[in-house]
Image (cartoon, rainbow, N blue to C red):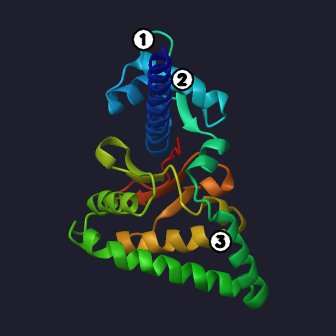
């Protein structure tokens, strides 16, 4: 009887561990692909929509995710499914435990050398990223579309939840480079020089002048950078979703 109770407790613990792991996967998918519906999450993870909604309810209860009405322009039969994005608590869960230490170091740097010292550090930091990813991008050729996709793959290896979305039919207008999670998000909230240096690096890496439309550090649910493609039409409305 004692063994049976212990086995039941162990089985229950294993189930909780599996549930926590699955919620981590759900949160990661929302971070990378949000706004995203429960059905799309289920498809990406090979789970049932019912199971995903159960995890979404838990994540929403923890304030890790939030839902919103679907993006304007989406049409379909019946009531449109709500889309999910990562909330502030979810980003807190995803960020590094060394954030506060990094912020303290940056404050010390600013106190010693001013804003120029902060920007110099940001440029030096992003120069390392450029060096690590440039070979991958150069192998993709000169087309900004291909280089953006190569950058997405490189950023994922760097810890960013990155993705690329076409703007216009077949990317005729451009590409949106999206980062659903940023390892330095909380530090960049206080030190936007990190975002500015990263944007400049993206322009150099992609060979075109890119435009940062939104950032996590500014309170948006995703960092969005517009990458124009050859022959892109000017003055076209660009959505950050």
Q: Which mark is residue 77?
A: 1
Query: Of circles 3 and 1, which is in front?
Result: 3
Looking at this view, name the residue that lies furthest to the right: 111
> Residue 102 shows which numbered tag?
3
Residue 87 vertical placement versus 160 (above, below): above
| Circle 1 Cα neighbour tier, 10 Å, few/some/many (<14 / 14–19 / ≥20) | few
Q: For the residue labelled by badge 1, is the local secondary structure a helix, a strand or a loop?
A: loop
Q: Give the foreground label among 2 and 1.
A: 2
Viewer-proximal residue, 111 or 76? 111
Where residue 85 sits in the image (x, y, percent)?
56, 37
Lateral position of residue 70 relative to residue 203, left or right: right
Instruction: Name the spot of residue 209 as percent of width and height, x first.
Output: 45, 69
Q: Which mark is residue 82?
A: 2
CA distance for labels 3 and 1: 49 Å
Q: Residue at x 59, y 26 (%)?
A: 58
Q: Earlier in the sequence, mark 2 or mark 3?
A: 2
Q: Residue at x 44, y 24 (%)?
A: 11
């Amino acid at each position: 009887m004692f063994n049976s109770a212990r086995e039941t407790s162990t089985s229950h613990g294993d189930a909780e561990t599996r549930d926590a792991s699955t919620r981590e996967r759900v949160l990661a998918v929302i971070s990378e692909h949000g706004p995203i519906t429960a059905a799309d999450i289920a498809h990406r993870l090979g789970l049932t929509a019912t199971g995903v909604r159960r995890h979404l309810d838990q994540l929403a209860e923890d304030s890790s995710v939030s839902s919103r009405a679907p993006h304007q322009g989406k049409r379909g039969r019946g009531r449109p499914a709500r889309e999910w994005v990562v909330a502030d608590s979810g980003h807190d869960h995803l960020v590094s435990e060394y954030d506060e230490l990094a912020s303290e170091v940056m404050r010390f740097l600013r106190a010693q050398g001013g804003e120029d010292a902060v920007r110099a550090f940001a440029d030096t930091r992003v120069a390392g990223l450029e060096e690590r990813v440039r070979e991958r991008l150069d192998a993709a050729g000169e087309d900004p579309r291909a280089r953006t996709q190569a950058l997405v793959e490189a950023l994922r290896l760097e810890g960013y939840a990155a993705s690329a979305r076409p703007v216009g039919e077949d990317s005729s207008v451009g590409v949106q480079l999206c980062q659903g999670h940023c390892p330095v998000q909380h530090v960049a909230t206080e030190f936007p020089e990190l975002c500015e240096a990263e944007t400049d690096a993206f322009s150099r890496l992609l060979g075109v002048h890119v435009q940062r439309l939104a950032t996590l550090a500014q309170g948006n649910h995703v960092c969005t950078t517009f990458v124009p493609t050859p022959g892109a039409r000017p003055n076209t409305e660009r959505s950050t979703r």
